[in-house]
Image (tube, grey):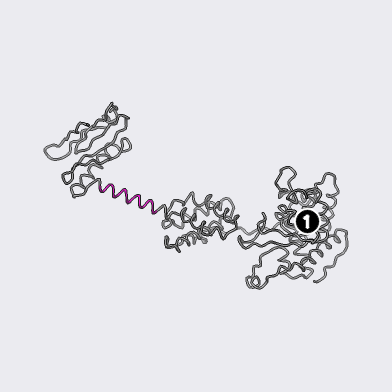
Amino acid sequence: MLPPARKLLPPDGKIMSKLTEVAIKKAKPEAKAYKMADGGGMFLLVQPTGSKWWRLKYRILGVEKLLSLGVYPDITLSEARDRREQARRLLANGADPSAVKQEAKQAAQKALQLASENSFATLATEFHKVKSPMWTPGHSKQWLMNMEKYALPIIGNRSIADIEPMELVGIMRTVETNGTFETRDRLLQSIGAVFKYAIATGRAKYNPAEIRMALTERPKAEHFPCIDTNEIPAFLRAVTDYQTMAKVSPIAITAMRLLMLTATRTSEVRFSKWADFDLDAGCWVIPEEQTGRKGKHGKRKPHAVPLCSQAVAILRVLYPVTGMGEYVFPNRNSAGRVISENTVLKIIEIIGYKGRMTGHGFRSLARTVLGDMGHRWEVLEAMLSHALTNETAAAYIRTTYFDERRGIMQQWADYLDKVEKGADVIPLRA
């Protein structure tokens, strides 16, 4: 049993404090716990382990109770005395300090639990779970990655109702410093969607993500370098000269030729698979899920590309080289991977067109030349696998114009052959 702490009450009723910081620091642990009284029922309990606990002994309604005031040195002597006085004031008003402390603790725990349930991270995770079944796997993964990288470290633990617009402005400006404006805009859209979800489920009253006017304007998109149409003959002859050089990779040159002949995207060619080609039918179907596909997530569709006779011919020549594998253009140095995005650019650099032409430039050339020939814009947009920006047109145009595009692509390939040979080609109106 612990010996009772001595009460030091002078005649005037004031507490005569006894302990000093020096005495507390010098107090050494003993085999049994012992008390060091300070007066007014407060004492320091020195444990055999060396820890020192502040305690307050008091009576209420005839019942003796013990109140914990903290641990020394986290709670200093002066702080412990302040807590003793607070407890004495509660007692003077008929309140039980232990009960008041327990109620405050429960209220804090409840507030913490409520904040956790209504935190931005909780709402974002809940929203993602609700919406991800309607998204593509790629979009679902990217949505979560952007949140985890930029938003959750800053506002993840904040209550959804306490987040202010300027906090979101700060997040967006951090993303802006990296020059990734597209990521910034997508992230802001995602954060705004979480707040709209919180409002709809009764856990927020307003959306602080309406901050676009406070953000930097996105830089104007720079177009891919592309030669003029009158430079096409010289460029094609330079490509052919390069192809006749020794040790030229048939994989690289075929990739470049296929880009020219199909007006597809570089990434679509790089990640193409033999299973997607039907050379007998002259058709290449690019799956909606293929790496490099463009378009809104969840709204992509397979893109059927008609193959001209020239494209079929170069693919048949390449088949004995890579046809035993999955990819049409595999990386020669890394199994399971495809050629680099710089493969075509390297050829362009070697033949002297660095900075003036890109793989994407073939799409611009085809669109320009075929447009000058009089082919309909909606057919050429389908050729490029572009989504129609005119909503009215998009609502009525359901066809992909595949048969018409087959003739157009053959005309494009024949045009390239003729201008390379130096023939004067007069564009014929479609």
242 is within the stretch colored magenta: no
Which residue occupies 81% across, 64% down? 410
Question: For the residue labelled by badge 1, is the local secondary structure a helix, a strand or a loop?
Answer: helix
**Residue under numbered circle 1:** 258
Q: Is residue 275 left or right of residue 77?
A: right
102 is within the stretch colored magenta: yes
Q: Nearer the viewer, residue 101 or 162?
A: 101
Q: How many marks?
A: 1
Q: Position of residue 216 (x, y in %)?
A: 55, 57
Q: Quadrant of the N terminus?
A: top left
Q: Position of residue 203 (x, y in %)?
A: 42, 60
Which residue occupies 19% across, 46% down? 91
The image shows residue 64, relative to residue 400, as above or below, that is: above
Q: Nearer the viewer, residue 169 or 198?
A: 198
Q: Quadrant of the C terminus?
A: bottom right
Choose top left, top right, bottom left or bottom right for residue 278. bottom right
Q: Is residue 415 left or right of residue 9?
A: right
Which residue occupies 12% across, 40% down? 12
Q: Nearer the viewer, residue 340 or 221?
A: 340
Write the start and end of the magenta stretch as one range: 99-114
Name the chief secondary structure element in magenta.
helix
Q: Position of residue 83 (x, y in %)?
A: 25, 42
Q: Position of residue 233 (x, y in %)?
A: 83, 58
The three-letter code of the residue at mark 1 reads Leu
Choose top left, top right, bottom left or bottom right for residue 266. bottom right
